[in-house]
Image (cartoon, rainbow, N blue to C red):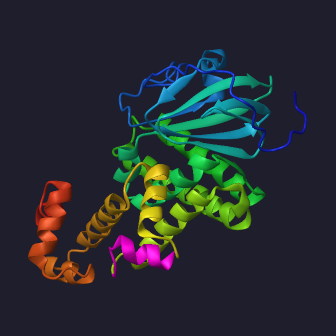
């Protein structure tokens, strides 16, 4: 089965009734972790035949092929993956292993959005990779990126296995995970810049909106402003973003403002008033009200909670 295949190979789905379950069968059989916010498994530790039943998970997952070949179905499309290829499974998407070569070896890292954000990773990274991967979840990594990803997956495995001995294993794992996410986000961005025709107009527009949002969030929070920058109507932008991300432009703008505020609150030298000015609120009381409405706590209480 170790032959060259055209990438990506997409065929008509032959499975019409995906299962609805909270975990992928076979992935948890050799782990005794009590924390369900993330899970890393090596294919050598999995019962691969159990993965040949459709599974729909609420969490995201990364799959990296180190050796051999794997054919799987992701969101009713079939992909043939070989050495050096990477797949990002977005949340709530059905996956199914269709076949694998005898020499296949891959690693899977499943994680909840809370775990990703809890490590300090910017929300925009998670949004960006979800938007891009919803259209095309597979990457062919260049030699340097593949080597880096291999090392980071190895580190994640080691940190998990040594977790019982460490004082704060999850914190270390989150740092390694953040580095891995940065590598993958950068690779996806390069891929979409070099191969724009592989991505739908709606995905490209949503990606551009998120990019513009990061650049102008401290100055503007109007959907009309971003629609103007992208030369589309406000209605068209809102429709595309909602379809791709499941969230309205206003929701994403609000989340981004709160994420920026949380980052600024980490600096004890900045007063609440300074942060309000930085984010262009009319006064600090309006900022406090805005922040509390979306987080359930005041900026000061958030800062004190650490």
Q: Report x, y in % for residue 78.
A: 71, 33
Residue 284 is one of the magenta-drawn residues: no
* In front of the other: 102 or 4: 4
Q: Is residue 251 above or below residue 115?
A: below
The residue depicted at 50 percent of the width and 27 percent of the height is 56
* In front of the other: 211 or 84: 211
Say which quarter of the image contains residue 187.
bottom right
The residue depicted at 27 percent of the width and 73 percent of the height is 264
Q: Is residue 35 visible?
A: yes
Q: Quadrant of the N terminus?
A: top right
Q: Report x, y in % for residue 14.
A: 69, 22
Furthest residue toward left: 285
The residue depicted at 9 percent of the width and 75 percent of the height is 285
Q: Report x, y in % for residue 142.
A: 76, 57
Left/right placement of residue 212 relative to residue 68 reads left
Say which quarter of the image contains residue 298.
bottom left
Q: Is residue 276 above or below residue 13?
A: below
Looking at the rendering, the stretch of residues picked out in magenta corresponds to 219-230
Number of numbered discs on residues: 0
Left/right placement of residue 270 relative to residue 166 reads left
Q: Is residue 109 above or below residue 48?
A: below
Q: Is residue 1 above or below residue 240?
A: above
Q: Is residue 214 visible?
A: no
Q: Report x, y in % for residue 239.
A: 45, 57
Residue 227 is one of the magenta-drawn residues: yes
Left/right placement of residue 66 relative to residue 96 reads right
* In front of the other: 265 or 90: 90
Q: Quadrant of the C terminus?
A: bottom left
The residue depicted at 63 percent of the width and 32 percent of the height is 76
């Amino acid at each position: 089965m170790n032959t060259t295949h055209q990438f990506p190979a997409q065929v008509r789905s032959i499975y019409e009734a995906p299962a609805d379950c909270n975990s992928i069968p076979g992935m948890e059989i050799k782990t005794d972790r009590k924390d369900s916010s993330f899970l890393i498994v090596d294919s050598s530790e999995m019962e691969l035949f159990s993965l040949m039943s459709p599974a729909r998970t609420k969490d995201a997952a990364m799959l990296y092929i180190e050796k051999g070949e794997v054919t799987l179905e992701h969101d009713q499309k079939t992909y043939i993956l070989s050495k050096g290829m990477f797949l990002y499974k977005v949340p709530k998407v059905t996956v199914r292993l269709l076949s694998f070569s005898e020499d296949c070896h891959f690693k899977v890292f499943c994680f909840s959005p809370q775990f990703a954000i809890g490590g300090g990773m910017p929300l925009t990274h998670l949004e960006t990779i979800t938007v891009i991967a919803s259209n095309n979840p597979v990457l062919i990594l260049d030699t340097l990126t593949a080597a880096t990803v291999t090392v980071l997956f190895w580190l994640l495995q080691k940190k998990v296995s040594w977790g019982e001995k460490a004082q704060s294993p999850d914190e270390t794992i989150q740092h390694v995970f953040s580095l891995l996410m940065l590598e993958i986000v950068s690779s996806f961005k390069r891929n979409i810049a070099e191969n724009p025709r592989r991505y739908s107009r709606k995905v490209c527009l949503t990606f551009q909106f998120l990019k513009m949002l990061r650049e102008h969030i401290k100055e503007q929070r109007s959907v009309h402003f971003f629609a103007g920058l992208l030369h589309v109507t406000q209605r068209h932008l809102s429709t595309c973003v909602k379809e791709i991300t499941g969230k309205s432009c206003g929701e994403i703008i609000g989340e981004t403002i709160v994420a920026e505020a949380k980052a600024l609150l980490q600096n004890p030298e900045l007063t609440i008033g300074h942060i309000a000015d930085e984010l262009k609120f009319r006064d600090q009381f309006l900022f406090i009200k805005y922040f509390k409405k979306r987080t359930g706590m005041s900026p000061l209480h958030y800062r004190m909670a650490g």
